[in-house]
Image (cartoon, grey):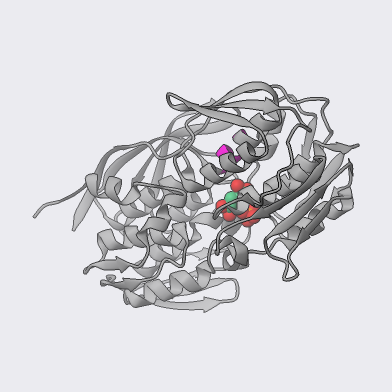
Amino acid sequence: MGRLSGTVRVPGDKSIGHRALMLAALAEGRSIVRGLGAGADLASTRRVLEALGVACHDEADAVVVEGVGLRGLRPTDAALDCGNSGTTMRLMTGILAGQAGRFVLDGDASLRRRPMRRVADVLAPLGADVRPAADGRPPVQVNGGPLRGATVRPPVASAQLKSAALLAGLLAEGPTTVVESGPSRDHTERMLGGRGVDLAVDGLRVTVRPPERLPATDARLPGDLSSAAFWLAACALAPGSDLRLVDVGLNPTRTGFLDVLEAMGATVERADVEDWCGEPVGTLRLRCDGLVGADIGGDLALRALDELPLVALLAATARGETRVRDAAELRVKESDRIAAMAEGLRALGARVDTTPDGWAIEGVPRLGGGSVRAHDDHRVALAFTVAGLVADGPVILDDPACAAVSYPGFAAALHERWSTDR
Ligand code: S3P
């Protein structure tokens, strides 16, 4: 067995990156966004904004965005290509609902399978005219126009739905309130507050009052905890590893995976925590000599949502049983992640049962090699890249390239930090 060592800096946070680009586009004047990852999803947001008349250019390690003002996006005849990115499509739907003109948002085959009726429903009380295709999926037509503030209750706890409503609320007449059923990630709230927008948070209730204008604001993105999670999982599966992950975002609405690791018997050390543009950032180090099964559900499952595929991987060789509940949203991500992880893990010899909202997994001593499908889903591909490092035989992934949606170069970086005693 090998181990990982060294210091790693992961790509900039994808969720914050989308929002930084969008808010820079809606601001007045020039904003500089530093630390944007090279993943395809952020390129999709940039491409959509450019198609709407926002000038962006690269400068050293930054992207410079020339804001067009809150209502300055220009309609275009061509469909706006959101690629694989649900965040781009849902957040832009909120923004475009309040612009003058007609817009069409579309995406790749995976995005075209994802539910968009829910964003139309969330924006309807504001008077937004948002029309997905008849099956409730993309392409989404947005007939932009004046909006009025309203109170909305998204049907599921989702930062994308909440953010679509808050961004539309920037353009509405009067305040907009979102009442959530659970604590979804709060980057939009932090960033709007940091730009001087009148925003009040009271538990699961957030109210935004439309500003006259948004000031241009530079942003520096923390490393993406969802990308750091692949390294942490690899360390947990390779005892004796000693890796430092530096400048990682530690927003408490995102750190569920760290709590899951601890519940499964690992120790996660946090150091050098500081504030970057309203977000906590720090260094992570994981110690682990064997994992045990755990019961994961409720708010913890929500705070670890994007990392639950990795929890399934960890559970596959943890001692005892792991249950993951309350994660039905995984079925409508870039793939049906409950089914995709179960299929792949079984191919490697794991004992996995699926439930409508998660898995029941009985740990086996070791994973073997096998052929695994990524299902067009970067997080599935990345999770099985980690599996390939620690399995007893080769793990053959049908589409490793789809990992580039969030983490281009991960497999090579992982192998660079890996050493065996042989
Ligand atoms: C995201 C929110 C989450 C997450 C996605 C990114 C965001 O989706 O799964 O990867 O940036 O707002 P939901 O909030 O819709 O579940």
**Residue 389 x %, y %:** 26, 59
**Residue 158 x %, y %:** 68, 54
Residue 65 is covered by the magenta coloring: no
**Residue 230 x %, y %:** 39, 52
Q: Looking at the rendering, in which quadrant would you find the N terminus? A: bottom left
Residue at left 34%, top 48%? 410
Which stretch appears magenta?
15-20
Q: Looking at the rendering, in which quadrant would you find the C terminus? A: bottom left
- Relative to residue 193, is residue 9 drawn left or right? left
Q: Is residue 289 visible?
A: yes
The total of numbered circles placed on residues is: 0
Residue at left 68%, top 65%? 137
- Relative to residue 147, is residue 112 drawn left or right? left
**Residue 392 lies in what quarter of the image?**
bottom left
Residue 19 is covered by the magenta coloring: yes
Q: Is 70 in front, or is 251? A: 70
Furthest-left residue in this view: 422
**Residue 233 x %, y %:** 37, 54
Q: Is residue 399 above or below residue 36?
A: below
- Relative to residue 338, is residue 319 drawn left or right? left
Q: Is residue 268 above or below residue 237?
A: above
